[in-house]
Image (cartoon, grey):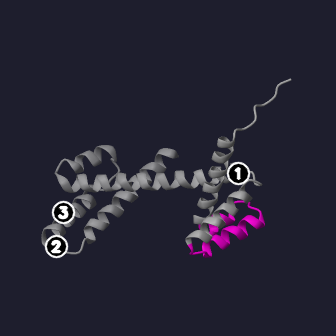
Amino acid sequence: MSREAPISKTQRKKQVTALQEIGEELVGLNDEQLASIDLPEALLDAISAARRISSFEARRRQMQYIGKLMRKVDAEPIRAALEAWHAQSRGHTAAHKRIETWRERLLADDTGLPELLREYPQADTRQMSALIRGALRERETGQPPRNYRALYQALRDLIENAGLGARD
């Protein structure tokens, strides 16, 4: 006969804390995200109540209650949905950083544009050159950063379209 060892009190506390943390993440979701997860009505009501509570101690107790309700729910689908949103957010952040890096490299010195054209041969050389010149001129004269922003948009379009073309 195989018997599983009983779960220690410390392990149970870790599990309960993890469920409560998932509950806290659920409270932070917007209504659309929350609606896309299949949650029991009692848990949805508790999450809605937690959003309205401003008192620290009352919110802490409500979060403990949400953790208690989470013990009765299969947490894996919820974890999977939360991880998918986190991964999507990390992807957006990485893309933003990549675009910012290219913009700064283009404005830093003359080697930026040839590097960009090597990596993205479909880039419009004239448009990029004009935006770079305009952004540099704006920096020097203290004008509003219209070309600086337009350069970001052009880079974003270029990089996103290159990514879509690679997936086709």
Q: Is residue 52 magenta?
A: yes
Would you identify the image quadrant in which residue 108 lies?
A: bottom left
Q: CA distance from mark 1 to mark 2?
A: 53 Å
Residue 142: assigned label? 2
Q: Looking at the image, is mark 3 or mark 2 nearer the viewer?
A: 2
Q: Which residue corresponds to the image point at 19% horizontal and 47% vertical from the top-left?
A: 111
Would you identify the image quadrant in which residue 85 lies?
A: bottom right
Please tell me which of labels 1 and 2 falls first in the chain: 1
Amino acid carrying mark 2 in the image: Gly
Q: CA distance from mark 3 to mark 2?
A: 14 Å
Q: Residue furthest left?
A: 140
Q: Nearer the viewer, residue 91 or 161?
A: 91
Q: Which residue corresponds to the image point at 70% horizontal and 51% vertical from the top-left?
A: 75
Residue 133: assigned label? 3
Q: Which residue corresponds to the image point at 47% horizontal and 52% vertical from the top-left?
A: 90
Q: Nearer the viewer, residue 6 or 21?
A: 6
* Picture coordinates of residue 127, whole percent (x, y): 27, 61
Q: Residue furthest right?
A: 1
Kindly report the secondary structure that dominates the magenta region of the rendered protein: helix
Badge 1: few (under 14), some or many (20 or more) residues near its Cα, within 10 Å? some
* Picture coordinates of residue 50, whole percent (x, y): 63, 70
Please tell me which of labels 1 and 3 falls first in the chain: 1
Mark 1, residue position: 75
Which region is colored magenta?
A: 29-55
Q: Nearer the viewer, residue 40 or 162?
A: 40
